[in-house]
Amino acid sequence: MNSGDTAWLLTSAALVLFMTVGLAFFYGGLEPKRNVLHMLMMNFFSIAIVTVVWSLLGFTLAFGPDVGGGFIGNLHYAALMHMSGVWPGTHVPKLVFMAFQLMFAIITPALVSGALAGRLKFQAWIAFCVGWSLVVYPLIAHWLFDPSGWLYVFGARDFAGGAVVHASAGVSALVMVLLVGPRAKRAAEAYKPHSVPLVLLGAGILWFGWFGFNAGSALGANQLAANAFTATQLAGASACIAWVLMERAFTGRMTVVGLATGGVVGLATVTPASGYIGPMPALAVGVAAGVVCYLATRIASRLSRFDDSFDVVSCHGVGGVLGMLLLGVFADYASNPSGLTGSLGHHMNGLIFGHASLLGHQVVAVLAVVSFCAVVTYLLGMLIKLTIGLRVSEEEEVQYGLNAKFDMSAYEELLGTTFPAMTAQAVIQEQVQGEVRL
């Protein structure tokens, strides 16, 4: 065991956990006042739910000894049995590795909550988190994060969760949006972010935590962590610039929410490639993320009956897929020799280095993850719809707001008046109905 590696991974696990709190603030700021507590509860409660599910079964299904040809792990680590000693291939205790991977399992379903803002029952959210954390996330984590997973053996790579986290959340959000349906017209018309400063605070926490997300995936305090840390910062920064320039070109103005969302999009897109590419390719990944995901939000805003409240599909789904494909373009064996050595001992490089096979493997991985998540999430969503039900009542959605379920208000009245709602999102809705939302 190495004390430096252990300390870094413990720190990274805490950083990734903090990201879920940042996500709650980001989404909460985009909500109107009447729903903000509901959104905060969904995100924060996922920490508790997924922790229990992961400890009992999720971890062993994802990282237990393989059973079934790289499809799923066995029950060797069920209820955190057999957790003494060092995790294979690392210099950190098994429990530290488990805790680090837990934080990824927590934030992934939490990302989906932003697509369903303003209309999903809280009890339906609990059922979704439990089911999704058992039958979706552990399997795709095994496929790509575990060296015995079938996609990893096949030759696909995902350093920190482009497919496992972002693409899976984006596809699942797409399916759930279609199952739940759009917000009522009156509710949608009044759906304005109540606090742009809260959005920016959430984005800042996400960016801060993302260094643990990506650099922590090196599983040690080493050169690889330094490379991933640098790639993360460069991609986030270049995506910020690209997004607000796209805003300016299409709408004539830049926005604070756009700046924040651009950064998050860049961070999400570089996630799968952060441990396999150099600094200048990371800049290119960020620019591509800002341009492509911004255009995706504009297209999504024009689709009738498709109501992804905070553009989870356009930002995380599209960004995750884009990052997986760009990994196949920019991967450099020299940046991560152990990670880019194939099962037969061959060196793996990206398309710009003359190797096309890795890009092909990335395409297969994306198709496999997207297809699996879409089918299983649909079945899970239909089961919840036919039993618990998915939507809140029209009175809650339009008149009372979802905070009422918790018998409290987000803000106390001040001198007989409540804090006014912010109107930044209305600016974009006037332009294209697509203010940059996560």
Image (cartoon, rainbow, N blue to C red):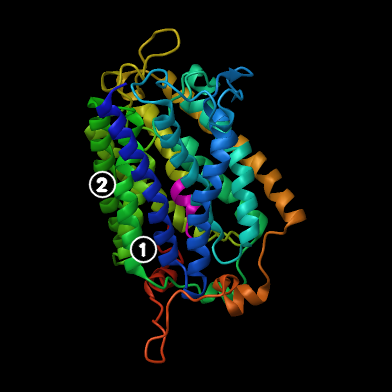
Badge 1 amino acid: Val
Could you tell me residue 295's position as x and y percent? Answer: 42, 53
Is 181 rendered above or below residue 268?
Answer: below
Is 63 rendered above or below residue 280?
Answer: above
- Reading the image, the residue beneath label 2 is 238
- Reading the image, the residue beneath label 1 is 199
Determine if the magenta segment contains residue 270.
no
Is 48 rendered above or below residue 119?
Answer: above
Judged by depth in the image, the label closer to the viewer, 1 or 2, is 1
Picture quarter containing residue 183?
A: bottom right
Label 1 close to label 2 by CB (< 8 Å): no
Find the magenta span and give its range: 310-316
Image point 68% across, 45% down: which residue?
A: 380
Of residue 289 and residue 202, the one placed in the foreground of this image is 202
- Does 258 sit left or right of 177 as displayed? left
Among the two numbered marks 1 and 2 on one chain, the one whose residue lies closer to the N terminus? 1
Quadrant of the snapshot with the N terminus: top left
Quadrant of the snapshot with the C terminus: bottom left
Q: Is residue 287 visible?
A: yes
